[in-house]
Image (cartoon, rainbow, N blue to C red):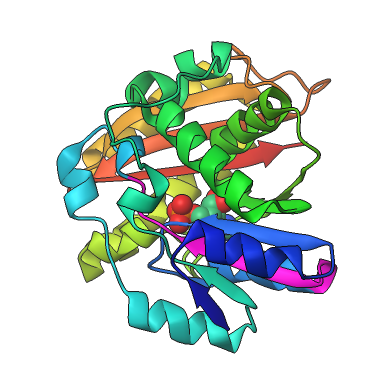
């Protein structure tokens, strides 16, 4: 695996490579969820590029940024195991030469007013800034992202439209621990007991899906929000939406593709997950 730290060197290398180029942007502390994206890209592309960059501008909570796990040596080992061709490892200066104060403002519209857009002000604008910079550096044909970050996938789809570029966004299923907990770098910050307890998130999503024919979404939401609270979770949202556009739904509508989305905190660690219905 080649490692580049500077955009110019990366571009120079990519220019001489055959297409399609597949790209997987990450913030490191890699797990099987990340690796599944890389494996899919390797199957479909001639060259697979992964980036690791903990993007400061997408953290609305400074302590979340400071505590974000960094496991670079282990990440490099894992990337070599799945035969990644290129790792792009830029510095903050390389990604934000004009400083962190000078961000591009993106018109993400409705998507920025709901769910993580609402609870993490500025988060998606930070995501768009770094994803555009990375896409311009790598210039991939295919971009691989995880459905675990469901709203982020729609935001990046919008970004690609705004950029008017020809990049195919491929969304990949969420990888889970054996107990159902969605794999996440932030899981590293949970105690062993909390990591077990956090399986309650998937249990709730799954139970809501199972019970959708028997009870209204509102009843189920109240029930499972209380269940989570009793178990030490602090839930920001538990909502039902149209999976195509994230328009909120009051109740189940079997004529639509739906998704249940949750953000909840355990031991101060913010965890998100979602489950599609239909
Ligand atoms: P992150 O390092 O958290 O920014 O994630 C990098 C990419 O990996 C994003 O596209 C995520 O959606 C994806 N990803 C994170 N966790 C998972 C998971 N459990 N399963 C599949 N993809 C994931």
Residue 44 forms part of the magenta stretch: yes
Task: Determine whether 138 is above or below 119 in the image.
Answer: below
Q: Residue at x 79, y 52 (%)?
A: 141
Q: Nearer the viewer, residue 219 or 104?
A: 104
Count of marks, rendered view: 0
User: Where residue 108 sits: x, y (%)?
Assistant: 56, 18
Task: Determine whether 50 is above or below 167 in the image.
Answer: below
Which quadrant: the N terminus? bottom right
Q: Is residue 77 left or right of residue 9?
A: left
Q: Is residue 268 left or right of residue 241?
A: left
In the image, the segment drawn in magenta is 43-55
Q: Nearer the viewer, residue 178 or 137?
A: 137
Q: Nearer the viewer, residue 192 or 127?
A: 127
Whether residue 119 is visible, yes or no, is yes
Residue 244 forms part of the magenta stretch: no
Q: Residue at x 49, y 50 (%)?
A: 202
Whether residue 211 is visible, yes or no, is no
Which quadrant: the C terminus? top right
User: Where residue 24 sits: x, y (%)?
Assistant: 61, 59
Q: Nearer the viewer, residue 88 or 255?
A: 88
Question: Residue 32's quadrant in the figure?
Answer: bottom right
Question: Residue 11's quadrant in the figure?
Answer: bottom right
Question: Residue 63's quadrant in the figure?
Answer: top left
Q: Is residue 142 left or right of residue 98?
A: right
User: Where residue 21 sits: x, y (%)?
Assistant: 76, 62
User: Where residue 191 sits: x, y (%)?
Assistant: 20, 65
């Amino acid at each position: 695996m080649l490692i580049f730290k500077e955009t110019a060197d990366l571009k120079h290398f990519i220019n001489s490579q055959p297409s399609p180029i597949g790209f997987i942007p990450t913030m490191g502390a890699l797990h099987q969820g990340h690796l599944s994206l890389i494996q899919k890209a390797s199957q479909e592309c001639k060259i697979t590029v992964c980036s690791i960059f903990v993007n400061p501008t997408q953290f609305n909570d400074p302590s979340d940024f400071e505590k974000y796990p960094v496991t670079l040596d282990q990440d490099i080992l894992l990337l070599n195991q799945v035969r990644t061709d290129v790792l792009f490892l830029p510095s903050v200066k390389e990604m934000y030469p004009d400083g962190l104060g000078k961000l591009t403002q993106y018109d993400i519209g409705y998507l920025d007013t709901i769910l993580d857009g609402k609870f993490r002000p500025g988060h998606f604008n930070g995501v768009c800034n770094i994803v555009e910079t990375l896409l311009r550096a790598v210039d991939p044909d295919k971009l691989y992202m995880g459905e675990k970050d469901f709203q982020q996938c729609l935001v990046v789809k919008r970004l690609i439209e705004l950029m008017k570029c020809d990049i195919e966004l491929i969304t990949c299923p969420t990888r889970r621990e054996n107990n159902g907990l969605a794999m996440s770098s932030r899981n590293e910050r949970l105690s062993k007991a909390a990591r077990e307890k956090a399986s309650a998130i998937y249990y709730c999503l799954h139970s809501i899906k199972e019970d959708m024919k028997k009870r209204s979404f509102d009843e189920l939401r109240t029930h499972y929000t209380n269940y989570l609270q009793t178990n030490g979770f602090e839930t920001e949202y538990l909502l039902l939406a149209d999976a195509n556009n994230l328009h909120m739904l009051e109740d189940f509508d079997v004529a639509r593709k739906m998704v249940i989305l949750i953000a909840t905190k355990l031991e101060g660690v913010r965890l998100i997950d979602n489950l599609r219905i239909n």
